[in-house]
Image: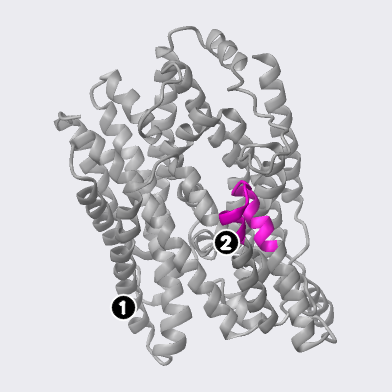
Amino acid sequence: MSEFGALNWSIVVAYVAGNLVLGYFLSKRIETAEHYYLGRRTTPWWAIGISVVATYFGALTFLGGPAWSYTEGFSVIFIHINYPIAIFVVVTVFLPFFYRSGVASIFDYLENRFGLTSRTVMSAVFLFGNIAYSGIMLYTTALVLEFITGIDVVDAILIVAVVAVTYTMLGGISAVIWTDVIQASILFFGALLTAGLLIGALPESLPATLDALKAEGMTDPFEYSLDPAKVGTIWTGVIAMSIYHVVVYGVNQMMVQRTLAARTLGDAKKAYISMGYVAFLAYVLFFGLGVLFYSYYGGRIFENENLIVLNFVAGVGIPGLMGILTAAVVAAAMSSLDSSLNSMATVTTLDFYEKFAKKDGSPEHYLKASRWFTLFWAVLMVVPAIAFTKAGGSVLEVLSKVGSFFVGSKLAMFGLGFYSKHASERGLLIGVAAGFLALWYVEMYMDIAWPWYCALGGIVSIVVAWVSSVLFDGFQDGYSEYTVQGQKEKFRREKLDELEDGWYVLPGKVDRASYWLLAYFGLCVVGLAIMQAAI
């Protein structure tokens, strides 16, 4: 596009300026590094919940979701149907450990359970993986700006990076959460508006279109194939991706850190549970767009499917619409980039700088260091963003595949930490190395879909880690205090209350509200079956 227009520019500029102004005002509430990481622990749960949703449903979902289902069909919905299962596990086991620790880095748990080396290794794994994640986010947003304005994609990457790092450095986690609330509203408004316009622009009625798509197999969510090379099957969705999302939401500093800013553990759980309900409906929307676009464009092949949404909106020609859509995509990217930058700065400061470089700094010193590390990571993430400009295919799938290489090691570390009596630090490190080698072999020499990487890497890491622990350090006499069983014994021994404000603080105890998530998962599966039968 060559003519963006004053109206469209005013919408985008107003959105960007609003983020910067909000970051400035929130910066006045930050006096220490803890405020930068966790706010003042006064953020309402609903804002945290929206922030979690906004972070995961970023620009990758807005553009990459429709691109994915455009080429693969609606069966990819099963990759993201498992959130109720994953959130059930996370709020029951993971959050009680992390919230009650009182610290901002979730990797503090690994030091308490195993030792400093484990903490350092997994912190480094997180930082490395998040750089790739941030790079794809920057690339996706730059695609939008390049398409609309003609600006060079590298220049667009730099502009977005500068805006994101500015308000994140100013306002810390509080700016991340509250700007995410605004960004989520813009994102979903843009998606719903696009859906309404697309349905109205279909060459046939919606029922007739769906009937034709069903005949081509594009609407069927149930792919029963046992072929391990297929991505979108019910087996990858219910089994492999349930494990994947447990790790993504359970031991992802970027996701968990905002829940640590909640007033209570119960509020942290409510924020996550809200995600368990919203995720499926959101992915139905985004993947549904891709299937309808397949009908609208007659299944034609695009050079870059990630631009399908933008191509459609550009052709509609409604004044201000492209500005709204641009703001939606930029908002989606910002909601993920700010979270990524803040969490990387937190981990760098707490897990590396404070541990190895400056152990006796003041709260004000660590606040200044955190802001400098935020800037450092913003500069560094530009490198993979430029590299991804050469990549093709759905950016959502690319991101998921990159992330799958790292989640297996996290599954082993935290899974054995929570439940194993005999796991030791030396055994764990050997297991993690074995898991990475196994995934490298699978990627190079086997035809297995990426959703299985987490399960495969995790199983190899867990088995090797447990065997190595026993061989090198022998069987342990009792459970560590930092296991689920150890916590049960501690609560019983010290006669501690298992409930706080009606929510369990003891890891492993299931809250009543969590059981409804499992019922909701069943309803989602039934709903898909009814939908397919009704078409």
Q: Residue at x 29, y 68 (%)?
A: 375
Q: Is residue 389 above or below residue 339?
A: above
Q: Is residue 277 above or below residue 97?
A: above
The span picked out in magenta is: 439-458
> Which of the marked residues, 1 or 2, is nearer the chain's N terminus?
1
Magenta highlight on residue 454: yes
What's the residue type where badge 2 is placed?
Answer: Trp
Magenta highlight on residue 55: no
Residue bearing the label numbered 2: 440
Residue 464, quarter of picture: bottom right
Q: Position of residue 243 (x, y in %)?
A: 68, 54
Left or right of residue 471, residue 209 in this image: left
Q: Which secondary structure, mark 2?
A: helix
Q: Which secondary structure, mark 1?
A: helix
Left or right of residue 280, residue 6 in this image: left
* Label disc, if present, on residue 368 of the rendered structure: 1
Residue 104 appears in the rendering: no
Q: Position of residue 20 (x, y in %)?
A: 25, 54
What's the residue type where badge 1 is placed?
Answer: Lys
Along the viewing direction, whichever of 65 and 173 lies nearer the viewer: 65
Residue 264, quarter of picture: bottom right
Q: Is residue 252 above or below residue 1?
A: below
Q: Which secondary structure class fits the magenta region best?
A: helix
Q: Residue at x 44, y 69 (%)?
A: 37
Residue 455, quarter of picture: bottom right
